[in-house]
Amino acid sequence: MTVLINAGTHDTHAKAVVWGLRRKGTTVFHLASDRFCQTTAFSIRVGAAQSGATLAIDGETVALDQLSAVWHRRPFEALQNAGVQPEDEVFARGESQLMREGLYRSLELVPAVNPLDALVRAENKIHQLKHAAELGFQLPATLISGSPEDVRGFLAQHAECIYKPLRGHVWKSDSARRATYTAKVSEADLPADSLLRAAPGIYQTRVEYAFEVRAQFFGRQCAAIRIEQPTDGSLDWRRSQGTIDTCEVVDVPLDLQQRCHRLMEALGLVAAGFDFLVTDDGRWIFLEINQAGQFLFVEQWCPGLPMLDMFCEFIRAPSLQWRYDMGHAHRRISYSEFIESTSVITS
């Protein structure tokens, strides 16, 4: 069994899964997609006598038809072309991009988490929210727009609203790191109309809630935790996640799990994380589905949920129907073991 992980060079999730799969005796290759031209060579031979495609990664070669699964963790990092003259940069980058796209198309017959076309669609918040509404999820009143008139009208219509971007973004400088988070918004907070047109966004009515839930699905296996409201008054627990030590397991209602499966099927996904708000009267409000969401933090905050072991078992035979065997024959591994092993290696 041979698995290919398509992720950035320094992706912690990729490194942990490489470690875990090797502990389980699985052959695994890490395709560093941000260094595609530097550490990876893709070759394809076409012809009656010499058909086939191979990947050479850090001195080891694997034929694509030998792969049992591929994990497209976060595959679209910028390409780097070392040693190219400035006047040749555009040409070289274009050739490298086409080569990488050819590789991805050559991987389409390999079972994937998640299929590339599906993950691109699922990353689009408009696409996923439309499907969620059609499948009967409860959603806040939502406007996605870059029309100043519509945005101002929506905020005037509802007492309290929040804003979030269509895609998260991080600004980095020598002195600071700034990121997008869910935040309250009123008409007084809005910038000039020209900026509203330039950067469309998601506007929703604010929901009063008791707690949040992150529910991670690998196939039909669901693992979910309860996340308490931030104590700093913010609307996004990610801003204060460094202060979270533990979380409790929470049971996702069976009918809601089934609706999650239907949304994953509609989007073509076999794995995804769901974010919900749960109100005092027991309503589960859908926020979004993350096809490449983080999941190792779930095990950090709730060690009773073996997320790393679960995913390493899942990637060996990924499907929408997969379930975790709590009594599987392989020795269970943990994320804390990975952290301990890497600290020993680097110390």
Image: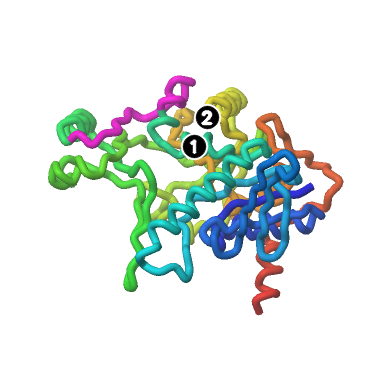
Query: In the rendered view, does 124 fall on the left or right side of 157?
Result: right
Q: Secondary structure at mark 2?
A: helix
Q: Earlier in the sequence, mark 1 or mark 2?
A: 2
Query: Farthest residue in the front direction?
Result: 48
The span from disc 1 to disc 2 (Cα, nearest Å) is 10 Å
Do the residues under discs 1 and 2 have CB atoms within 8 angstroms? yes
> Quick check: 74 left or right of 303?
left
Can you give x and y, in whole percent of width and height, for residue 340 in the image?
69, 68
Mark nearest the camera among 1 and 2 is 2
Q: Nearer the viewer, residue 6 or 159?
A: 6
Percent of width and height locating residue 211: 47, 41
Residue type highlighted by circle 1: Ile
The coloring applied to the image is rainbow
Q: Nearer the viewer, residue 79 or 77?
A: 79
Q: Which mark is residue 307?
A: none
Magenta region includes residue 138: yes
Visible residue check, residue 239: yes
List the residue tagged with mark 1.
289
**Horizontal and vertical percent position of residue 9:** 56, 62
Q: Which residues are magenta?
A: 130-147
Quarter placement of the C terminus = bottom right
Asked whether the viewer can see residue 213, the reply is no
Q: Residue furthest right?
A: 329
Place residue 175 in its image quadrant. Answer: bottom left
Give yes or no for residue 150 being in the magenta stretch: no
